[in-house]
Image (cartoon, grey):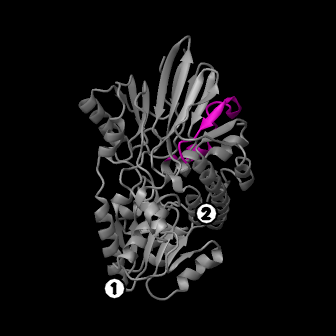
Amino acid sequence: MQLKLTFLGAAQNVTGSRYLLQANGRKLLIDCGLYQERQFQGRNWDPFPIPPAELDAILLTHAHVDHCGLLPKLVRDGFAGKIYCTEPTAEIARIVLMDAAKLAVEDAAFKKKRHKREGRQGTFADEPLYTVEDAQRCQDIFAPVPYDRSITLFDNLDVCFRNVGHILGAAAIRVETRYNGDTRSLLFSGDLGRWDKPILLDPANFVQADYIVCESTYGNRNHEETADIKQHLCEIINKTRAEGGNIVIPSFAIERAQELLYYLNELLLEDCIPHLMTFVDSPMAISVTEVFKHHPDLFDQDMREHLRNHESPFDFPGLVMTRTTRQSKAINHIQGTILIIAGSGMCTGGRIKHHLVNNITRPESTILFVGYQAHGTLGRIIVDGQPEVRILGQTYPVRARIERIFGFSAHADQGELLRWLGEIGNIPRRVFVTHGEAEVAHEFAQLLTDQKNWPTHVPEYQETVELM
């Protein structure tokens, strides 16, 4: 049996998830994500280590851009197979890729123009990573599969997807390969969700795996309680309203924006916050919210109860969905306190940059971060307390109040990672700890070794491991 695993991304960092699995003559790619950290973005333009045409299939854990955002480049460069994932993941990924392509073209044009104006030497980022046409070519090659049903991809290889609650459609994937009566199973966690979170069902897991590739984004900490999230959000909104500023929330379009709406709706129903105009200024978040409405079977009991009572968090008084650029620009002319939810969540692109320009110098306004901020991103620079930041080519002093609510995270914390792994009934041959900053990944790997006596390894970028 031939079994080989190469770590092409999310190795001692938290974006760019890509794992190349070679099993008995087949070549599978598990996830195909973009790097978002500034220091690693050049890797997005690097040639794929093997000709993409040699890949037999791609397995997608979920539709976040750091897990699916490189697909158009791979297809343009020769991949001609199928992309296997759940139905919600396929629906959301189609939206994400088209949005990413538009942003890539716009950002490249903006940077090229700015570099020329400043007389600076151009960089790789002056040309788009891929185009809208490239993203369009991905639309028809998704092959949706149901949760919890083993699918035979090839004569010696089966895959099964299991709900992990991270975002709508997210899955852990188990790959089983057979040779001469011998079977080996590999479990890829993708990004793990959390228990008792709004909207979605709790994570599930398999009970056996020979090898595990496990994320570790929050492998060294535990989140605050959900009750604290509502209280903290309530306090921030009321304080900013009293001071006459705006609340600007950089938010991921998938799951985070919908979860924010859920909490805002509950606070309004409980009469804890004033009825402010609330803008979801993200065409992608608006489209993804429509996908949520297609899959109520994946909602938890509380969310279903809200819908039965006609209290949908996706349609409350004062909520405005702004799709067009003209509508987005008009937000800046509104007097009085408003709440703006815009992407991207790490402030690496999108409309949030324009809202930061209009609010980050205002002491009465609040910039509220509700998600992970990777090293090197604009969001991380702001939350790290830099007195000045560069946005859209200009430098601005940071005078707005900067707030964070950690409990919003859709990623499992340390205790939840251990809870999920605790469902594995056997001792794995090895656990590969990925999708975490280097220090965090090593700390979580050591914790697994100390508490469970499991053999662990924190792989390096482009490291290949022979499993058989």
Q: Which residue is outermost to the front?
A: 308
| Residue at screen point 68% across, 59% down | 105
Q: Residues within 10 Å of mark 2 (few under 14, many from 20)?
A: some
User: Height in image: 312 above or below 49?
Assistant: below
Mark nearer the viewer, 2 or 1 = 2
Instruction: Residue 350: give x, y in percent of width and height.
Output: 57, 65
Three-letter amino acid code at disc 1?
Ala
Q: Is residue 400 visible?
A: no
C-alpha gap between disc 2 and disc 1: 33 Å
Mark 2 and mark 1 in contact? Answer it, CB < 8 Å.
no
Q: Position of residue 413 (x, y in %)?
A: 33, 48
Which segment is the magenta one?
A: 40-62
Residue under circle 2?
287
Q: Which residue is mark 1?
A: 242
Q: Label 1: how many residues lie within 10 Å, few (<14), some (14-19) or many (20+)?
A: few
Does residue 11 belong to the magenta stretch?
A: no
Q: Residue at x 52, y 58 (%)?
A: 254
Which residue shows up at 49% across the image and 58% down it?
255
Q: Amino acid at mark 2?
A: Ser
Quick one: SS at disc 1?
helix
Q: Which image quarter holds the N terminus?
A: top right
Identify which residue is drawn at 46% across, 68% down: 261
The location of residue 134, given as percent across then percent down, is 72, 49
How many numbered tags mark residues here?
2
Residue 53 visible? The answer is yes
In the rendered structure, the answer to whether residue 274 lies left or right of residue 42 reads left
Furthest-left residue in this view: 450
Nearest the camera: 309 or 436?
Answer: 309
Mark 2 / mark 1, whichever is N-terminal: 1
Task: Classify residue 136 as left or right of residue 407.
Answer: right
Decide which of 224, 455 is in the foreground and name it. Answer: 224
